[in-house]
Image (spheres, helix red, strand yellow):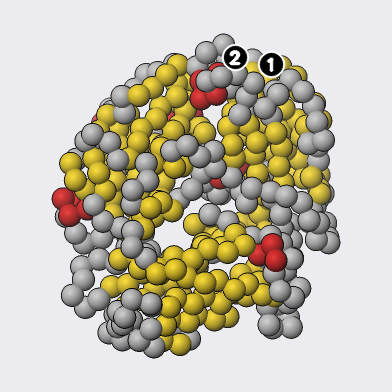
Amino acid sequence: MIKKIVFIFLFFFLPNTLFPQSNIVKSIKVKSEGHLKSNFIFDKNDVININFDILGKKKDDYYYTITHCDYKWNSSNISKFEYVEGFDDIRISDYFFSQNTFQSYTNFNFQIPNQSLNIKIDGNYIIRVFDHNHNQIFERKIIIKNKIYNGIINITRSKEIKDSPYSQNLQVTFTNLDNVIFNSTSDYKLLIVKNNNLKSSKIFSIPRLQTGSKLFYDNLKFEGGTEYLYFDSKNILLTSNEIRQVDFEKIYNTKLYTDFQESIYTRQPDLNGTFILNANCLQKNICADYSNVIFSLRTNKNYENDIFIIGEFNNNILSEKYKMKKEAKNYYTGDIVLKQGLYNYKYVVKTKNGFKELSNFWQTENNYKAILYEKKITDRYYKIIGFGENNSNKIVN
């Protein structure tokens, strides 16, 4: 009887914990209207589309909220009315059922801004989606910028001999051309994001040089990593250079060729971690099917720490369902249910502070974004005042 009471208490009075239903949330995409690739940085006037699937038949209604945050993604100390015009906690009313698919699902989508909500100020925001019991099923982070100073990012090979085989060094400069002084009493924070992955980001507090018209950051070091691997399941029944075998058992099974840990750098085009849903049908959001994608990896050494598969498709999360199973010495397998499309992915090792790639090369093509925050003494929240972007495809040796 006591156990039953405890269960009822946990079920009804802990509404903000992640619900097991999150296991059936798939294909979450956040992007600008009219674009295929996902993004997390938007201009204030952009229309942002949020799209996701729930596997199985529709059983619940879903709602979303939006929260303004500081540069570390902690909730800002301001009222919601200061950053939202209208109101959130709105039911998502646009949804469609899958058509002619073996795996049934419901596709949900909503936009920001909309008739009920508009974002008033720039900054970091967390979008959270809940079920009808207010159990959070997922969240995504976005950055809204408005009037900004353009930042210039220069990328070189690391200057330090011990790091030069596998690291990249960034220099970031923000120049003020509007006769507005960079204030010595302001608090400036620089966020550098690698390949649109906020889990690969770093925050820098003190510029190397600050004048009234310039902020200069130097020696911002990042490991080069490796190029993303990929496969394309648009034609779900066909094999290819990446797909070894396709069969069917309740849903499709897509078996990829074995991946090998790289010992030397290999140049290959990638999408820097994103995925693009695609299928040979018109309404791709509801006619693309799901398949159980089977991965395998052979490594150069025996790893003591767990190996995971990451990419935008799972928000680069190191959870149990994305962990590789060790089948033999230096050989790992894993499987993930994914919707038809073009996918980028990587294998990483879990560490105390996050994850580390299996190999690192200074030549690797990476995308870097720099976001500059400022908080004056009189401000109550961090404002975004600068943005810059560059790619290391023409890195200087």
| Residue drawn at 51 percent across, 25 percent down | 285
Q: Position of residue 378 (x, y in %)?
A: 18, 75
Numbered circle sitting on residue 392? none
The vertical placement of 132 against 298, above or below, is: above
Residue at 70% x, 23% y is: 236
Q: Secondary structure at mark 2?
A: loop
Per the rendering, the mark at residue 102 is: 2
Q: Position of residue 24 (x, y in %)?
A: 48, 29
CB atoms of marks 1 and 2 within 8 Å: no
Q: Which residue lies under the disc numbered 1?
A: 249
Using the image as rendered, state which of residue 186 and residue 139 is in the foreground: 186
Above/below status of 330 relative to 314: below
Q: Is residue 131 left or right of residue 358?
A: left
Q: Residue furthest front?
A: 178
How far is the residue under mark 1 from the one under mark 2? Answer: 10 Å
Say whether disc 1 or disc 2 marks the residue closer to the N-terminus. Answer: 2
